[in-house]
Image: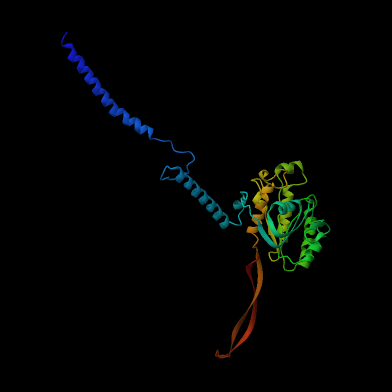
Amino acid sequence: MKHAKPAHGLKRYLFLILLVVSCILIVPGCLIYENITEPSTDAPSGPVTTTTSTTVTTTVATTTTSVTTTATTTQSTNKVTAATTKAPSTSTGKVSFPDTLFIGDSRTHGLSMYGRITDATFFAKTSLTSYSALSSKVNISGLGEVTLETVLASRQFKTVYIMLGLNEIGNKVGSIAGKYQAIIDKIKATQPNAKIVLQSTLHVTSAWEKKKPTFKNSKINELNAKLQQMADGKTVFFLDINPVFDDENGALNSKYTGDGVHFYAKYYTMWRDYLAENRSLTVPTTTTTTTTTTTAATTATGTETSTTASATDTTTVNTTTKGA
């Protein structure tokens, strides 16, 4: 019984050793675990060299700038494609259209109100048609309530945009085209140097087409095809606006409109931007080149004695220059 104490002391000694070993193995593991942090869900994709909040904020700003630059580059290199104008414009600035006249109905009037266009004249009002354009009066700043003829006589315009056709689409396409031609002739008579741009008549939504059978997109397409034929590519041009706003079925995309016909205010700048991107339409000029062909007169013996000009060919060559 007297020899049991040393054994009891040995047990305590072994317990202390095991406790020390356990601390050595377990405590570092705990410390390592406490230093592991979950990655932030707000951090941008790509490498982040530090974990401080300042560095993360700077990286986000840089990434945003890069995306914006890429979008701008894509738009500038694909100006004439509808795909580059599908997204609504984020520009809050105004765009100048100097020496420009717009003729149209309520949708063109909407462009004047919400398109953020400066330095242009708008002869536009609700329910204006190709039938009434030459007789109707519109309130023009500096001129008052005047007819289109008065506006045309008041100054010289470099560009005249026309978009009509929807309100009168129930009539025959040939009849509408005839009224368009009368407007074109009136403009040419008073504005001989103006570039006339026939914009395509914009489509309506599929829902509106079903609700109002008179306004058929197929009929609008017939009119637009006729207007395209009327464009001579010299002083009269056709510009198709519909690809900018159409859905996959060739109807006005419902996300751009509340009533099936008119755009929401914020989308008129898309129309404006498309016009701005395509305002430099090619204007052909005619250059006459005279070529003289010479033939050799020979004697009966085959000896060349003289050379005389025997024919003159006049060739007309079309070259193109960029219009304003």
Residue 84, image x, y percentages: 59, 52
Residue 60 in sight from this viewpoint:
yes
Residue found farthest to the left: 3
User: How is the structure coloured here?
Assistant: rainbow
56 horizontally vs 318: left or right? left
Residue 157, image x, y percentages: 73, 65
* The C terminus: image quadrant: bottom right
Residue 25, image x, y percentages: 29, 28
Residue 185 in sight from this viewpoint:
no
Image point 67% across, 46% down: which residue?
256
Q: Quadrant of residue 312?
A: bottom right
241 horizontally vs 132: left or right? left
305 horizontally vs 265: left or right? left
Image point 57% across, 54% down: which residue?
75
Q: Quadrant of residue 49?
A: top left
> Does residue 17 sit above or below 139 in this rendering?
above
> Does residue 166 sit above or below 187 in this rendering?
above
Residue found farthest to the top: 1
Q: Nearer the viewer, residue 270 or 211?
A: 270
Image point 31% across, 28% down: which residue?
26
Residue 27, image x, y percentages: 32, 29
* The N terminus: image quadrant: top left
9 horizontally vs 137: left or right? left
Image point 22% across, 20% down: which residue?
14
Question: How many circles with numbers are drawn on the protein?
Answer: 0
